[in-house]
């Protein structure tokens, strides 16, 4: 039988928790660069292992059969899922894992509430429990909706009911009202039914907040929900008097909040606008959804290969279409063939390209694209006028000149990769269909733009093959 050997709140447990969250911080710092991200992930994992083992060895921990069973089942599911998931599915995996974290916090809060009912339940412990329960439940259910949208289990377009904002407001007021009542009467054996009602109302609010948000805004939503999960974990840590949980949750909450604000800035929008405007999922189709096709120029892979092979510099702009086609290796092969001919090849990375922050960086790193060739939007835009050919692969809204030229456009003011300023543009895309914003891309119809209608992976392979023949 396992025996607890560490005293809760003692010097040893505090020291081990300090060590664990110090490793969290180092791991996150290492994760800011693709060249050190893998090492950072391993360092943070060691920190988490220390925190888990320390917690399991605390005096008072019991039910070892349940704990070990949970560790085995959870570990097996996590390992299998992580091995089998495709890189294109990583955003929804992140959303799902984040939701699991929020759900775990909500269940812990419910458990702590049940243990404290009718006994000595200090208010300073009870308030964090209520906060963690509400935010954890919202994060769990909201993350499930984000996962379902990214996995195409439900439509990516905004799904709203009549009076959506009024319903959300009523739910929020009801949640706050019940929490206040429970807080005032926390020493008088408050009803567990009310606590469960809070969890249910928070679940409804989580669903109703995320459902009206379109697919284009899912990266920001995932980041925001991640921040919410961190804050709920920190609140649970205050109630449990767990230093590691407090610090780790605060780190996740603050970093997620900063990332959310940075992404919103990259889209030239506010977080409230993202949450309540329902942008990012207008019905797609034809030219801007009107069904009217505008004049455009199309080329073959052979034509594109000639333009690229005799260029001085090429900038590749990846987007979600590249991820869907799993074209990163084929694109790297195409770039290698061009570089053999002395062509300078770089990759322009937009902050919100793909379906999660850093999505394109992760895909290209998987194909062994050197980190120094990945150039951020602010750095690459001034070089666009000197770029011989810009190759847009699966990107749409992040290259749309309407963001700069049309003040009435839904994406007006959003910073974009300014590929329209390149000397020549080649767009590899299956069709002229709009992106997640649901609006036509004026880039497709410029005189300097040539459309290569094909699967991104197939097109890149054919271009690479044609380049070798020249």
Image (tube, helix red, strand yellow):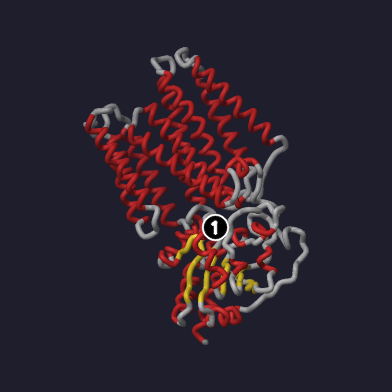
* Residue 393 at x, y percent in the picture: 57, 67
Q: Is residue 189 left or right of residue 268?
A: left
* SS assignment at label 1: loop
Residue 138 vs residue 1, the one in the foreground: 138
Rendered view: 56 above or below 269:
above
Residue 166 vs residue 66, the one in the foreground: 166
Question: Residue most toward the bottom?
Answer: 470
For the image, the number of numbered tags is 1
Q: Residue at x 75, y 68 (%)?
A: 294
Q: Is there any visible trace of residue 80 in the rendered image?
A: yes
Residue 163 vs residue 416, the one in the foreground: 416
Q: Residue at x 61, y 44 (%)?
A: 274
* Residue 345 at x, y percent in the picture: 48, 73
Q: Residue at x 47, y 75 (%)?
A: 344
Q: Is residue 65 left or right of residue 294?
A: left
Tag 1 residue: 353
Rendered view: 37 above or below 114:
below
Rendered view: 267 above or below 313:
above
Q: Is there any visible trace of residue 368 in the rendered image?
A: no
Question: Residue most toward the top?
Answer: 188
């Amino acid at each position: 039988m396992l025996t607890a050997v560490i005293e809760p709140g003692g010097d040893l447990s505090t020291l081990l928790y300090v060590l664990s969250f110090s490793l969290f911080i180092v791991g996150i710092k290492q994760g800011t660069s693709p060249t050190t991200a893998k090492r950072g992930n391993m360092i943070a994992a060691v920190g988490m292992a220390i925190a888990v083992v320390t917690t399991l060895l605390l005096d008072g921990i019991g039910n070892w059969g349940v704990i070990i069973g949970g560790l085995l089942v959870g570990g097996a599911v996590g390992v299998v899922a992580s091995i089998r998931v495709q890189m294109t599915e990583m955003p929804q995996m992140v959303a799902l894992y984040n939701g699991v974290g929020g759900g775990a916090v909500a269940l812990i809060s419910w458990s702590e509430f049940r243990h404290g009912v009718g006994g000595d339940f200090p208010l300073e412990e009870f308030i964090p429990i209520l906060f963690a329960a509400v935010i954890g439940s919202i994060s769990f259910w909201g993350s499930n909706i984000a996962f379902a949208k990214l996995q195409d289990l439900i439509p990516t377009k905004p799904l709203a009911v009549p009076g959506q904002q009024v319903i959300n407001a009523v739910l929020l007021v009801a949640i706050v009202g019940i929490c206040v009542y429970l807080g005032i009467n926390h020493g008088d054996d408050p009803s567990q039914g009310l606590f469960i009602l809070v969890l249910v109302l928070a679940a409804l609010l989580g669903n109703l907040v995320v459902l009206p948000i379109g697919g284009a805004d899912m990266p920001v939503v995932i980041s925001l929900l991640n921040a919410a999960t961190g804050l709920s974990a920190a609140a649970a840590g205050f109630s449990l008097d767990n230093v590691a949980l407090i610090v780790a949750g605060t780190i996740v909450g603050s970093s997620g909040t900063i990332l959310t604000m940075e992404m919103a800035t990259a889209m030239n929008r506010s977080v409230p606008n993202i949450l309540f405007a329902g942008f990012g999922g207008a019905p797609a189709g034809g030219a801007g959804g009107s069904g009217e096709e505008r004049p455009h120029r199309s080329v073959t892979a052979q034509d594109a290969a000639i333009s690229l092979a005799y260029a001085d510099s090429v900038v590749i702009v990846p987007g979600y279409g590249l991820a869907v086609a799993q074209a990163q290796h084929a694109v790297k092969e195409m770039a290698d063939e061009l570089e053999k001919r002395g062509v300078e090849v770089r990759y322009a990375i937009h902050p919100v390209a793909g379906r999660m922050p850093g999505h394109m960086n992760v895909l290209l790193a998987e194909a062994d694209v050197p980190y120094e060739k990945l150039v951020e939007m602010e750095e690459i835009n001034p070089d666009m006028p000197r770029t011989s050919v810009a190759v847009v692969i699966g990107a749409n809204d992040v290259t749309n000149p309407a963001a700069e030229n049309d003040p009435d456009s839904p994406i007006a003011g959003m910073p974009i990769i300014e590929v329209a300023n390149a000397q020549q543009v080649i767009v590899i895309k299956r069709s002229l269909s709009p992106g997640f914003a649901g609006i036509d891309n004026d880039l497709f119809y410029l005189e300097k733009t040539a459309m290569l209608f094909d699967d991104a992976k197939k097109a890149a392979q054919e271009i690479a093959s044609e380049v070798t023949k020249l």
